[in-house]
Amino acid sequence: MELGIILTPSARSKAYIQKILKNKFSLSEIIFLNDGKIEPDFEQEEIFESNRNGFDISESVLSTLEKNNLSFKEFDFIDINNQELVNFIAKSNSDFFIFSGGGILKDSILNTDKKFIHFHPGIVPQYRGSTCFYYSILIENQCGVTAYFMDKNIDTGKIIFQKFFEPPNHKFLDNVYDSFIRSETLIEVLKNNLLKSDNFNEQPIEGKTYHIIHPVLKHIAILSCIND
């Protein structure tokens, strides 16, 4: 089994690649989709929380790759369906790709016969869609992550593994907490060799899909975390 990863310049990608390296997992291929946008400045408290959660949000993906002398293929876009990327992946020897970005896969990339693994911050099928961890905090006072194989629909692929998490005790949910719960689930999947299984669970067709949370509800969820 050959495992590759598709990174973007995101906090999530930082957590993925840093934790993979810390746990000494090997990757057959690293693809870096880099549109060259300037990274935001992170306040010290946010950097502290990221380190407390096992990664350094202030270290760029490119810096991590270069300082660890990792070979990688870089593209100057972040579109997973770009034909240049599709052509490259079609020729790859990797069987699986961890995808750290977002978006819906189109037929052209799905037809490469590679399996793309996504770590979704929600327990599907109950929490499909966007910003699901905010909704699950508000509704259940807990969060979950589902590792699944991506298909052409939104969060409907075969389930590899699901894991529950308690809400955080800080306000940095978008960059730190989201990256933490996804990356921890990734590491558990790799530690337990779950990709080697032939028994992945089909999802029910029926489920609940959420859309980007309203700022007021988001604020209430954050307050519920820091006031506990």
Image (cartoon, grey):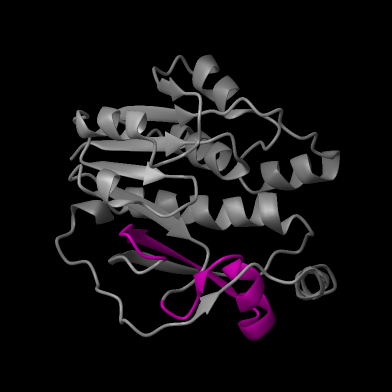
Residue 207 image offset from top left, x and y in percent = 42, 83
**Quadrant where the image shows the N terminus:** top left
In the image, what residue occupies the spot 74% across and 72% down?
Answer: 214
- Image quadrant of residue 146? bottom left
Residue 37 image offset from top left, x and y in percent = 66, 29
From this view, report whether residue 170 is shown above or below residue 220.
above
* Closer-to-camera residue (5/106): 106
In the image, what residue occupies the spot 45% across and 14% down?
Answer: 69
Residue 187 image offset from top left, x and y in percent = 42, 49
* In the displayed structure image, the side of residue 96 where residue 10 appears, left or right: right
- Image quadrant of residue 98? top left
Residue 136 image offset from top left, x and y in percent = 60, 77
User: Which residues, given as a range, are shown in magenta?
Assistant: 125-154
* Closer-to-camera residue (157/29): 157
- Image quadrant of residue 148? bottom left
Residue farthest left in this picture: 198
From this view, report whether residue 207 is shown above or below residue 180.
below
